[in-house]
Image (cartoon, grey):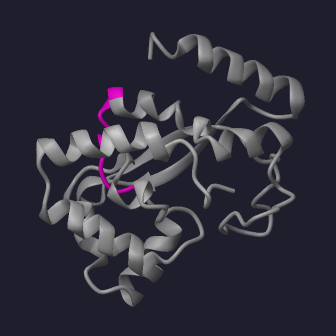
Amino acid sequence: LIILSPVMLLIAILVKLTSRGPVLYSQERVSFDGSRFTILKFRTMTTDAEVDGPGWTTAGDDRVTTVGRILRSLSLDELPQLINVVRGDMSIVGPRPERPVFIEEFRQRVPRYMLRHKVPAGMTGWAQIHGWRGNTSIDKRIEYDLYYIENWSLALDLKILALTVFRGFRNRNAY
């Protein structure tokens, strides 16, 4: 957090100067054993983005701000989640935390979905470094999440962290 604080301050200023509303966006998510927490992100969408209900962001989504589009494409909107890591809400590596509104649907439709809650949620993970994030196949995301859980090791975590630096910050599915 200390090392990244100048970058985070610059991002906060850009968000504030280019759109109305708060700099940070908070949202309820689910992590280890179904525990709920409030995830923090830099706000990348208009303040009324979910007035019609929750939904996935899609390519060219007009709810995303100009600065938000850049932050999302580089995954810089996720930097405030380091605060969630320090708080103990989530880990740096693990399956991405999901919103409660989607979990019931996924647990009914995707076999073994709830197994992903047997480890803490993470900022980055095996599914994310392989491009399975956002509005992509939930079945593939779970396949990769379960691979991570079943094959966890310190070496795998270090590999994910290294790959995050090289391919995780730029993602074709980050709208």
Query: Which of these two is toward me, 81 or 36?
Result: 81
Specify whether 153 is left or right of 22. Answer: left
**Residue at x 61% of width, y 61% of height:** 173
Residue 16 visible in the current orientation: yes
* Residue 7 found in image quarter: top right
> Could you tell me residue 87's position as x and y percent?
34, 29
> Could you tell me residue 128's position as x and y percent?
43, 56
Q: Is residue 96 above or below residue 75?
A: below
Specify whether 103 is left or right of 91. Answer: right
- Residue 109, magenta (yes or no): no
* Residue 71 found in image quarter: top right
Quarter of the picture containing the N terminus is: top left
Q: Is residue 39 above or below residue 126?
A: above
> Could you tell me residue 105's position as x and y percent?
47, 82
* Residue 145 found in image quarter: bottom left
Q: Is residue 99 above or below residue 3?
A: below
Quarter of the picture containing the C terminus is: bottom right
Specify whether 152 is left or right of 108. Answer: left
- Residue 95, magenta (yes or no): yes
> Could you tell me residue 38's position as x and y percent?
48, 43
Residue 90 visible in the current orientation: no
Query: Which of these two is toward me, 82 or 47?
Result: 82
Specify whether 124 is left or right of 116. Answer: right
The stretch in magenta equals: 86-97
Q: Is residue 94 above or below residue 39?
A: below
Q: How many marks?
A: 0
**Residue at x 35% of width, y 46% of height:** 122
